[in-house]
Every structure is written in C-alpha cells, then in structure tokens.
Image: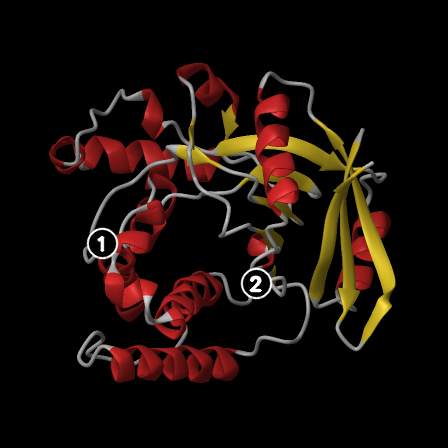
Amino acid sequence: MKLVIQLNHTSAPTLIYELPCTFEETHFKDKWLARFYAAKERKDPISEPWAFYNLNNEWSNDWLVSFMNQKIDICNEIKPGLFNRHLTDVTDQQTLNYLHAVFEITHGTLDSWKEDQLLLNNPALRESLSYINQTIHRCESSGDPQSRKIRVVYFDLPKTELYAPEDYDLFTTSMDFGGVYVHYTDVGKPIQELAVANDTDHHAIVPYLHYSADFIIRFCDSDGIAQLNAEEEYKRTNATLLSEFGYEVGDVRLTAGKIKIAQLDFTPDPFNKQNVLNKIAKCNNIANVIIK
C-alpha cells in the first residue's frame, strides 16, 4: 500500500508527477487512513492545492505582501476595523503575530465558525481569513530551504478525532527529506511555533490535540535537536502561562514534534534529492492524493 501524491502545473494539467510514499508501520497508520478515507467518501476537495513552500518561483516576497494586504482589505470591508494594520515586509514577525492573533479570535476554534452568523453568511470573509493564516506561515518560512514542503489539507473534513496518549510516543522533531508528517489541524498556536516566533500577541496556546487527513511532505533533513531544545526551553520559561491555558509542563499533549506517517520512495543521495526538487519546481498544483 502506497500513499501517492500527484502533482502537476495548472498550465499542463495532464502531465502528472507522482510522489509515491511507503507508510510507516505504526499503530497510527490506520487512524490516519480512516480520516483520509472519510475525506474521500465525503468528496472533500484538497483545500488550497497550491500550497508549495520554497519549492517553485511562484511566491515572491512582494507578491506575498500584496496578497496579504488585499485579503486584509476584504476582511475590513466586510467587518470594518477587524485589522488595524497592514504588512509591509515578510520579515515583520510582530505584524505577522498580530495578524495571526486576529485570525485566531475571529475564526474561533476548529469548526466553531459554523456557529458564527457573520462567518457563516460571508464566505468571502471566511476565505480571506484562511488565506491570511496560510500567508502568515508562508511569510515566516519564505526563502528558507529548511522549510521546503508541500501541505495537503482538507478544511471541509470535520476535526473530530483526538490524539490518544500513546500517539504522542510517535512524535518526533527530526525531519527526513521526503518524510510525510501529520499536519497541525487545531486553531491557535502550538509550542512548535511559539518557541521560534517570539509571539506575545497570540490568543491561545493550542497544542496538537486533533488530527485529520491533513499532512505535509518535507524536502529537507534535520536531526530536530534544535527544535526540541527550543520547545523544551519554551515550556520551562513559560510554565505559568501554560498553566493559565490548562497545561502543565509535563503534559503529554505538549510533546514536541509531530507524527511521521510515510516516506517518499527514492534513493537518498544528493543527486536524487536535487532531481526530485527539479521536478517539483515545475509543478504548482496538488492534483490528487490516492492510495495504491
């Protein structure tokens, strides 16, 4: 059984480049597959199928700033005063943190937007908020080869499943080129982001609580030690804040990292890695994800 990610370019949709991945044989495999099959059964589309990060030349820094501000203006037209500033530089982390805090507060947790009449009746507001959230993360990783990834998400699939305590035993901060990892599906900021973003504007600390069919495939290698140390240091120095949000330092839900569910099938040498990157660079769209 393989997880196969099919990529193409919107200008040549019939030319498919496949990324076949072998599943990790862990207890979590069937849990993730159940959510994936649920998305397929519901015919949920892949949300934002252009989510390539630092892999092609379609997202310049100037374009990101312009795109972000367009979406801010749409939100403010629908809900005047929602945002009180615009972005001028992708490296302005303080403004990015502020924008994310407004997103968190306005969107609410997971599927709670469905109970908000303003969001429910204004799909343009909901869509623009989603774009703002994703563009924040794109700005934060812009130009960083250690952030090369493709993100596959199904926003329409209800987020109903919680990680069990034993699932956190599989969390890892290390990254493998071609590794497939379960993506963050909650709304808020997990320790993984707070540890590196110096964020004092965040609305809520929300660790990896729910899982879905969402995943990312990474195209970089890291032993994860720096990330692990950063997260552990954040927990030590922010124990009081964590307690205010209902978490103690030793809470298993604050475990660093994420679960690896599959690995790209390729020979891991520099030539083959560059060959994979060269082929992905010609793509800008996630055409489909299938199980073979």
**Residue name at image x 59 percent, y 61 percent:** 51
Between the residue at mark 2 and the residue at mark 1, the CA separation in whole angstroms equals 24 Å
- From the viewer's side, name the closer residue of 42 and 34: 42
Structural crowding at the residue carrying mark 1, measured as other residues with C-alpha within 10 Å and reported as few (<14), some (14–19) or many (≥20): some
> To which residue does mark 2 refer?
48
Observer-side mark, 2 or 1, equals 2
| 22 to 220, vertically: above or below | above
Q: Amino acid at mark 2?
A: Glu
Quarter location, residue 176: top right
> To which residue does mark 1 refer?
202
Q: Is residue 176 visible?
A: no
Q: Secondary structure at mark 2?
A: loop
Quarter of the image containing the C terminus? Answer: top right
Q: Is residue 13 visible?
A: yes
Q: Amino acid at mark 1?
A: His
Q: Which mark sits nearer the N-terminus, 2 or 1?
A: 2
- From the viewer's side, name the closer residue of 158 and 139: 158
Tell whether 15 sits left or right of 133: right
**Residue name at image x 64 percent, y 41 percent:** 41
**Residue name at image x 82 percent, y 43 percent:** 269
- Residue 126, how many percent across, how many down? 37, 66
- Residue 250, how many percent across, how many down? 27, 20
Q: How is the image coloured?
A: secondary structure
Quarter of the image containing the N terminus? Answer: top right
Tell whether 2 sits left or right of 140: right
Tell whether 219 sits left or right of 259: right
